[in-house]
Image (tube, grey):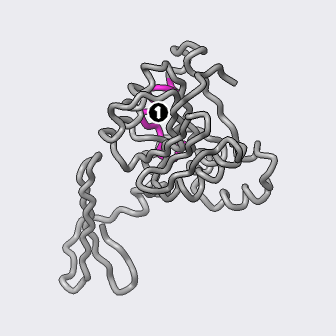
Amino acid sequence: YRDVPDVTDGWVITLDRDFAISTLLPILLEFIPAQFVAKVEKGDVCRVRLKSGSSVTFRTYAQGWTKFQGAKIHYAAFDEEAPEDVYDEVMVRLIDHQGPHWVAMTPLSGKTWVWSKIVKDRHLHDPKDVEIFQWKTTDNPHVDPARVKKVFGRMAPEIQIARMDGSFIDLQGLVWPNFDEQVHMVDEFDLPTHLKLWVGLDGGIRHPFACVCGATDERGGIVL
């Protein structure tokens, strides 16, 4: 519990608007007694207004950091990992009220900026400024541990660690985690002209451009 002003404006920030309305909004309304709610808005802006004058507004990462400028908020709650530029802009929005923020996430994107800026050097942060909690999926008393292990057991070991333990993993090599040069590499040769050729492009906005060229043969073999 925290001492807060009588009227507060806060943000809940998540992946997209549909998820906010279908999943997070109902959860929020479970916690707020109905008699305190003045209005629930689901238009261009999704917002819960309280009779006290306080409000909770849902924002999305898809909006981009420029859409977060100018506001002064009392707190922010991030659902899953935010893009770094969005996170930094929200931190600026919290300055006036010295507001707290929370991030609840599964580290499926590997050792991103969250790892390098917050988690890796946690010992450098003042404990009064930063608290880090890590839970395993099996710590949840409302899920069947056997079922969790069965479902996650089908995933790559590294992904299991991230999902089940909440641990940050190094994603290098995870596209083909079983790749072995001795098994999967062949000497250079000229492709027969009758093979079907494929070209896949990923232009990327945040990351480098990528291109993969492949050919398939009659037996289902693939050459990249």
Is residue 61 toward the left or the right of residue 165 in the image?
A: left
Is residue 153 toward the left or the right of residue 215 in the image?
A: right
Give the secondary structure at mark 1: helix
- Reading the image, the residue beneath label 1 is 114
Pinpoint residue 196: horizontal percent, then vertical percent: 26, 82
- Residue sitting nearer the eye, 221 or 166: 166
Q: How many marks?
A: 1
134 versus 195 height, above or below: above
Q: Image quadrant for the N terminus?
A: top right
- Residue sitting nearer the eye, 160 or 137: 137
Is residue 88 toward the left or the right of residue 19 in the image?
A: left
* Segment tinted magenta in the rendering: 107-120
Is residue 60 toward the left or the right of residue 7 in the image?
A: left
71 versus 173 height, above or below: above
Pinpoint residue 136: horizontal percent, then vertical percent: 70, 42
- Residue sitting nearer the eye, 57 or 148: 57
Residue at the spot 31% in from the left edge and 71% down from the top edge: 223
- The kind of residue tagged 1 is Val
Pinpoint residue 144: horizontal percent, then vertical percent: 80, 55
Residue at the spot 60% in from the left edge and 14% down from the top edge: 128
Which quarter of the picture shows residue 6? top right
* Residue 110 lies in the magenta-colored region: yes
Residue at the spot 21% in from the left edge and 81% down from the top edge: 192
* Residue 60 lies in the magenta-colored region: no
Residue at the spot 23% in from the left edge and 53% down from the top edge: 209
- The residue carrying pointer 1 sits among few (fewer than 14), some (14 to 19) or many (20 or more) residues within 10 Å by Cα, namely some
